[in-house]
């Protein structure tokens, strides 16, 4: 029965608070958080120390993991064997540790999340780098404490020779706090340590020149540097890691090959989750996924559907799966037994301070041993110099103690010296051994002086630390595995994944679209027959061709006047001879509508740009309209009305202008009209426009429109359907009979609405006019006929001729019985080489010479009345709808 006076009445609130604080501190200090000096939690430290004590080192054979676990549990860590074995397994997993400290033999799991085999099957031993954690531990370099049952001693910290906390990182959840430190490259970490050792005032940005960021064992790509800077500066930050993947192009499909995944991501679960997204129709474009990883490395093959854009699919994978993951850095560690959040400099500083203490304590230990050795050697030297008397004293003594006492009395030796003399072997009495004794004594004295210099001179001590760090770096350092891409942000922006390469956009008559690298179009001399381009099965042919770069916005305009938006990288890539993808699958085009014109723009989000630029529209019946680009700067999935098209008319051209351009419109009959952009007043998006050019009749039609800057050096390029073309200047400086030079308009500037002047002498041989372009000598023309044959010819190879000339043959179509379907002007690639069909060109030179003679005669007999400008009514059709 409990007596009343033995019961203490306490407040349960205070008792619970006190008990929980004790529990919290126990978890924080003795379980969950690493020490800043060696980067280890108690269980890791005990495992490494226990394996070292039992001789389970790299120079010896493997021992059963169960043996190691039992040794650690019985002597140092009185907890469950599963937690100890889990620690052993993690220290041996190369995908978990940047530098594994334990060499595991057997099944230690996988990056797929497979568990390790039972500890009775696996074997372990320390790795050489793991032994560096325990280097000099027997030299009184660190403090020890009694183990849990006071039967032996265990270290409070290990005398590690490299910054393990930074190199291998740490993860742990305590009570009220947690730590999450990423691993880093050993070479970079030691370089940063040496830099801090040499310059204690170094800044964190300067340290980042040596250690730019984490280096994960699984590789990957770190997106951006902001998270790294935050983590290194404050101890907290968010690092975004993305899988490293390549795109393989095949004839019928593309593959995404994943070689590296983010740290701590389970590969099997990643593949399973991607498959679930595909099955649930949340992720399209993927046909199959296979894991082809083996002992050589990781290889996840994601097979795409034939019409899928690999860059778009890859971006979705980053956004929707753990192919992109974040690592929340929280650098909390124990400093003098207290948890602290540390920045990069503080972590390295704590390690250097620890190494300084280890070197000093090791030096003191070695100095004491050296001085003890020198003291004994001094006694031995004295004995060797008086060997006869020493022998006489020893032989005349009754016992060992008596001999030692008489030697002390005679020579003034210490107990240690007399003990060494009494135990000296007879061979040490020879003259040779006496010389070696003196030599050894001198060496010990030199070592004592070296050790004292380390203790007395801080610079010498730092030099020792630096040398030992360099030894570790040279022995275990390796290349960085994780790439740091400062340009990436980690946001799901496809532009971060796609290089801004030049492309050619083509749209076929039946509505198939693709993008092709500009480099695939080879430059040829004019008159060539071209190279095979798009597959034109089903009587299809290329109808539109346009240059653009991958990051451009493409504004698509249909013949009915609708506008749609698309990024160039969203357009499927295809070779010249591939058909492309139906544009209806990319744009929400209404049935019966088709794309007739498109514009590339870079900055729809740039307010200054969109407000200072206009879109100028031209229709088949000669109508023109000008509207601010701002009206088209907000992309909509279903498109918007760009211009109201009247019945029997259709849109044929759209140009981007800055308000100061001159507009030239051309019709099938070879006439062109030139007027200033200001003649067309700005209208709203939903409007019809005004008369731009009066056509010759119902069978006539507008074929194109160009916008040119005043005083430009560009020339006007026109081409006919049978492959004839020429260049003509916009203006010339003519020399008058009196010798004066007068600036004259080759294409007269008039009001809009007229019939214009002749821009090409249209004959049965040339066929109707099909294209008009503004070009310069640095441009190429990419021409495609209805058979899909492409020709890329340098503009500089085409002669500048009179405005009313017939032109010269640019592409040889007679051999194909074909006509030109599409023309595009692009910049010249200086690395492309011309191809020449010499046999055909010899015949062409003769034919062109005749053509030029006829052109010159035609220029002389042109009727002046034909060149008169036929003004239209400026008010005609000038209504908004």
Image: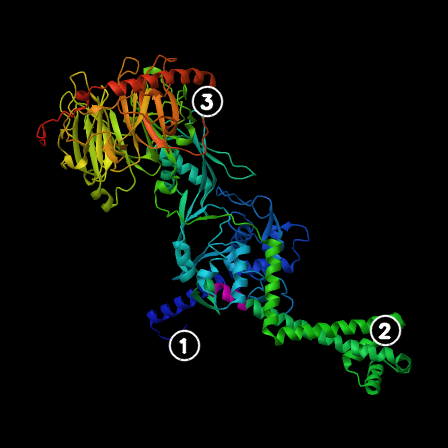
Front position in the image: 428 or 866: 866
Number of numbered tags placed on the structure image? 3
Coloring scheme of the render? rainbow
The mark lying in front, picked from 3 and 2, is: 3
Q: Secondary structure at mark 1?
A: helix
At 53% from the left edge and 69% from the top edge, which residue is drawn? 353
Q: Secondary structure at mark 2?
A: helix
Disc number placed over residue 6 in the picture, else none: 1
Magenta highlight range: 346-353
User: 10 Å neighbourhood of mark 1: few (<14), some, or many (≥20)?
Assistant: few
Residue matched to label 3: 836
Vertical placement of residue 339 versus 314, above or below: below
Residue matched to label 2: 434
> Left or right: 429 with respect to 329?
right
At 39% from the left edge and 20% from the top edge, which residue is drawn? 527
Q: Compare marks 1 and 3 and give the one earlier in the sequence.
A: 1
Front position in the image: 138 or 22: 138
Is residue 141 visible in the rendered image? The answer is no
Front position in the image: 636 or 227: 636
Query: Mark 3 near mark 2, Cβ–Cβ under 8 Å?
Result: no
The mark lying in front, picked from 1 and 2, is: 2
Disc number placed over residue 57 in the picture, else none: none
Q: Compare marks 1 and 2 and give the one earlier in the sequence.
A: 1
Asked where in the image residue 694 lies, by quadrant, the reply is: top left
Percent position of residue 278, x then y: 36, 33
Percent position of residue 577, x then y: 40, 22
């Amino acid at each position: 029965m409990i007596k009343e006076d033995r019961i203490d009445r306490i407040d349960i609130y205070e008792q619970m608070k006190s008990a929980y604080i004790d529990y919290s501190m126990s978890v924080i200090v003795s379980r969950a958080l690493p020490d800043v000096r060696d980067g280890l939690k108690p269980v890791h430290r005990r495992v490494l120390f226990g394996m070292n004590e039992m001789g389970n080192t790299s120079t010896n054979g493997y021992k059963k993991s169960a043996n190691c676990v039992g040794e650690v549990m019985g002597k140092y860590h009185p907890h469950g064997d599963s937690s100890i074995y889990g620690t052993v397994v993690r220290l041996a997993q190369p995908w978990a540790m940047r530098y594994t400290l334990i060499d595991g033999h057997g099944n230690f799991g996988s990056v797929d999340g497979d568990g390790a085999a039972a500890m009775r099957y696996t074997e372990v031993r320390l790795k050489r780098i793991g032994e560096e954690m325990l280097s000099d531990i027997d030299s009184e370099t660190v403090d020890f404490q009694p183990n849990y049952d006071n039967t032996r001693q265990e270290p409070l910290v290990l005398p590690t020779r490299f910054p393990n906390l930074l190199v291998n990182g740490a993860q742990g959840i305590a009570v009220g706090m947690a730590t999450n430190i990423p691993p880093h490259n050993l070479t970079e970490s030691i370089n940063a340590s040496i830099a801090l050792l040499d310059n204690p005032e170094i800044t964190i940005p300067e340290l980042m020149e040596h250690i730019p960021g984490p280096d994960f064992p699984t590789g990957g790509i770190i997106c951006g540097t902001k998270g790294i800077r935050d983590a290194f500066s404050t101890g907290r930050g968010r690092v975004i890691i993305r899988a490293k993947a390549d795109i393989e192009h095949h004839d019928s499909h593309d593959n995404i090959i994943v070689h590296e995944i983010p740290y701590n991501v389970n590969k099997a679960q990643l593949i399973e989750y991607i498959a679930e997204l595909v099955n649930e129709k949340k992720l399209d474009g993927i046909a199959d996924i296979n894991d082809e990883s083996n002992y050589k490395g990781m290889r996840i093959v994601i097979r795409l559907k034939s019409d899928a854009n690999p860059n778009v699919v890859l971006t979705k994978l980053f956004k929707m799966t753990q192919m992109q993951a974040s690592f929340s850095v929280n650098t909390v560690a124990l400093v003098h037994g207290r948890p602290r959040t540390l920045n990069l400099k503080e972590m390295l500083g704590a390690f250097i301070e620890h190494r300084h203490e280890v070197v000093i304590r090791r030096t003191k230990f070695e100095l004491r041993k050296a001085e003890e050795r020198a003291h004994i050697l001094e006694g031995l030297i004295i004995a060797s110099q008086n060997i006869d008397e020493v022998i006489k004293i020893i032989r005349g003594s009754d016992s060992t103690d008596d001999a030692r006492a008489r030697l002390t009395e005679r020579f003034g030796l210490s107990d240690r010296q007399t003990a060494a003399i009494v135990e000296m072997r007879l061979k040490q009495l020879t003259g040779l051994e006496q010389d070696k004794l003196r030599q050894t004594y001198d060496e010990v004295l030199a070592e004592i002086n070296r050790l004292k210099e380390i203790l007395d001179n801080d610079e010498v001590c730092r030099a020792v630390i630096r040398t030992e760090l360099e030894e570790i770096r040279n022995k275990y350092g390796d290349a960085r595995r994780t790439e740091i891409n400062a340009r990436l942000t980690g946001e799901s922006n496809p532009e971060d994944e796609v290089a801004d390469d030049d492309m050619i956009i083509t749209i076929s008559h039946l509505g198939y679209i693709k993008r092709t690298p500009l480099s695939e179009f080879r430059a040829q001399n004019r008159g060539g027959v071209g190279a095979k381009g798009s597959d034109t099965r089903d009587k299809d042919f290329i109808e539109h061709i346009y240059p653009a770069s991958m990051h451009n916005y493409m504004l698509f305009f249909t013949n009915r006047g609708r506008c749609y938006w698309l990024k160039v990288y969203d357009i499927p890539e295809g070779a010249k001879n591939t058909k492309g993808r139906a544009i209806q699958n990319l744009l929400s085009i209404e049935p019966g509508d088709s794309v007739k014109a498109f514009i590339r723009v870079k900055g729809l989000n740039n307010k200054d740009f969109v407000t200072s630029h206009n879109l100028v529209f031209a229709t088949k019946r000669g109508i023109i309209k000008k509207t601010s680009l701002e009206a088209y700067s907000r992309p909509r999935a279903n498109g918007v009305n760009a211009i109201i098209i009247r019945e029997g008319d259709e849109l044929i051209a759209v140009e981007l202008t800055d308000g100061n351009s001159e507009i030239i419109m051309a019709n099938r009959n070879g006439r062109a009209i030139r007027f200033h952009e200001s003649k067309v007043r700005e209208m709203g998006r939903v409007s019809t426009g005004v008369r731009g050019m009066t056509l010759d009749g119902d069978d006539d039609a507008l074929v194109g429109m160009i916008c040119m800057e005043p005083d430009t050096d560009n020339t006007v390029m026109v081409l006919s359907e049978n492959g004839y073309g020429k260049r003509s200047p916009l203006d010339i400086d003519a020399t008058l009979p009196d010798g004066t030079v007068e600036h004259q308009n080759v294409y007269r500037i008039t009001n809009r609405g007229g019939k214009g002047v002749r821009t090409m002498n249209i004959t049965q041989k040339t066929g109707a006019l099909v294209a008009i372009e503004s070009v310069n000598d640095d441009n190429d023309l990419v021409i495609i006929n209805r058979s899909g044959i492409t020709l890329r010819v340098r503009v500089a190879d085409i002669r500048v001729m009179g405005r009313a000339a017939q032109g010269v043959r640019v592409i040889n179509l007679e051999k194909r019985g074909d006509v030109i379907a599409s023309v595009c002007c692009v910049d010249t690639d200086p690395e492309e080489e011309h191809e020449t069909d010499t046999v055909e060109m010899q015949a062409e030179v003769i034919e062109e010479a005749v053509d030029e003679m006829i052109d010159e005669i035609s220029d002389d007999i042109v009727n002046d009345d034909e060149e008169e400008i036929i003004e239209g009514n400026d008010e005609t059709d000038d209504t908004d709808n």
